[in-house]
Amino acid sequence: MAGSKQTPRQKMINMMYLVLTAMLALNVTSEVLNAFKTVDDGIGRSNHSLQVKTAGLFNAFNTQMGVDAKKTEPYKLKAEEVRKVSMGLYDRLEAYKQQVIKEAGGFNKETGQLVSNDNIDIATRIFVEEKHGKELKEDILRTRQQLLAIAPESERKELDAAMPLLIEEPKDAQSWEFHKFNHVPTVAAVTLLSKYQNDILASENQLVEHFYKAIDAGSIKVDKMTALVSAPSSYIMQGLPYKANIMLTAYSSTENPDVFLGTFTGQVKKNAAGMYEEINSNSENPPLANARKVDVTDGLGKIQMQGGSVGESRYTGVIRVKDPSGNGYKFYPFEGEYQVAAKSAVVSPTGMNVLYAGLDNPVSLSVPGVPQRDITATFDGPGLLSKNANGSYTVKPTTRGKYKIHVAAKVDGTVQQMGDMEFRVKTVPNPVASLDGLYDGGKISPAKIKSTTGLVPKLDFDFVTKFTVVSYTITYSINGDNQRFECTGAALDPRFKTMINSRAKPGQSVFFDDIIVRGPEGTNRKIPSIAFALN
């Protein structure tokens, strides 16, 4: 008997064979033997129909190979393995049939019947006495297991229940081969062998069709289509073209996928073409760190992000769908980026485009619509321009004059000149001298002047800058007698401190003259003197 999912023709053939076998057991006349021939002819037509149907499936496989060979080939190879296994049993059944037909004297050309269609010894001897029936039974069982083994384990239970190729053990103590072939006329034996050929062809067709349908089993069924515009950027530069891709995209509005945002884990990889690979997993957990779910409506994920810090922001995530085959989940990685601009107007004080020699002058550069990583700048004067980690720049010129900063940006893979701006490079203003940064002239007590360590240049300036004292002279006037001390560096001469300690009196004067300092640009400058009167 065949399995539960038989065609009406298969069911009819099996029923007729059972009825005829039962009638044969009652020694019914030659009309019953003629009916076996009729059933065998019907089985032959059914076998031909199955062969044509299966051949059509293989033609469809070849067509699909031309459409998507990578997706189709694994299933086509399984279908070809099914054909190889089934044809092996089919040919062995055919060999048994031809042996029975030959020993029965072949077919009568006038009647189309076997010459000895009622001979009950031939099948008995071949299949029972010579034990070829036992071999056939084992062959059928082995072939059935080989066919099921070609399918994935998760699909075998369903295929097993529907496979027509079966061995039904007799309910009495007789063996299967005795029950099927003992004292059976040759025409009945031939019909039975044809019936098993029909079973193997039906099983082959079942599996080949199953693997053909599996080509699209993993595809998402779509029910809506819409036009989509994909552009590298919404910004364009003057004189450059706007470029965009227009495509027709399809999606399912009835089966909402799960969309997650987060940081990719090591499971996410790109192929040689730079595209993210599909991930198959038995776990429902997305391959992301700090994953958070996104709202999905009518099949479309809705991403909304708050514009935080100014600059370029990137995001990554995956789309999760259940594998239509029921084996776990499929994950599809994606990435995107957007630009955050400050809520401010740009006001440029054109009269203040000044850089200071020897200082690290901070400069901010931007090109609308272009990420900071694609912007470059050069300085055409003496000095150094460097890019900082946060995307800003630092200019450190060394010489006074007028120079320009030139800005370029990579747009569509090509570096374009975006413009330039002229700057005036000036030197930092001169500082004023002081003692320890506290006293810069006037009345002072001997104790205070003695407690100081030396000269310190002071500068009220917007940039943090440093001047160093190169040299200076101290003139100490005592009753018209001037004592002069030449100092190198900023420290006070110890001899001067000793004299203040021993001879200082109110009304005496101290002068700090010829003060030479070195500025941040590396040049020496002379700055004004300072004078003190002891009190």
Image (cartoon, grey):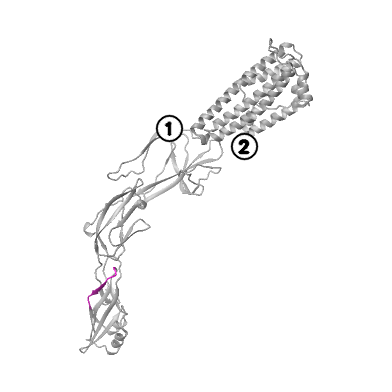
Q: Which amino acid does label 1 sit on?
A: Lys
| Residue 456 drawn above or below residue 249 | below
Left of 216 or right of it: where is 94? right
Q: Name the residue under label 1.
A: 224
| CA–CA distance in space, label 1 to label 2 | 35 Å
Any part of residue 178 in sight: no
Vertical arrangement, residue 156 with respect to residue 259, above or below: above
Q: Where is residue 190 in the image (x, y as percent from the top left)?
A: 70, 19
195 lies above or below 442: above
Give the extent of the magenta segment.
521-529
The quarter of the picture where residue 131 lies is top right
Examine the structure image and report whether residue 523 is included in the region drawn in magenta.
yes
The residue tagged with tag 2: helix, strand or loop?
helix
Badge 1 vs badge 2, beta-carbon distance below 8 Å? no
Sequence-wise, which precedes: disc 1 or disc 2? 2
On-image quarter of the C terminus: bottom left
Question: Considering depth in this image, is 520 or 406 the residue closer to the camera?
Answer: 406
Q: In which quarter of the image is residue 473?
A: bottom left
Amino acid type at mark 2: Glu
Depth check: give the residue in front, 506 or 278: 278
Quarter in which the N terminus is drawn: top right
Which secondary structure, mark 1? strand
Q: Position of residue 242 (x, y in %)?
A: 32, 41
Find residue 419 and report its horizontal and vertical position in percent.
27, 51
How many discs mark residues in the rendered view? Answer: 2
Where is residue 400? Give x, y as percent: 24, 64
Residue under circle 2?
A: 153
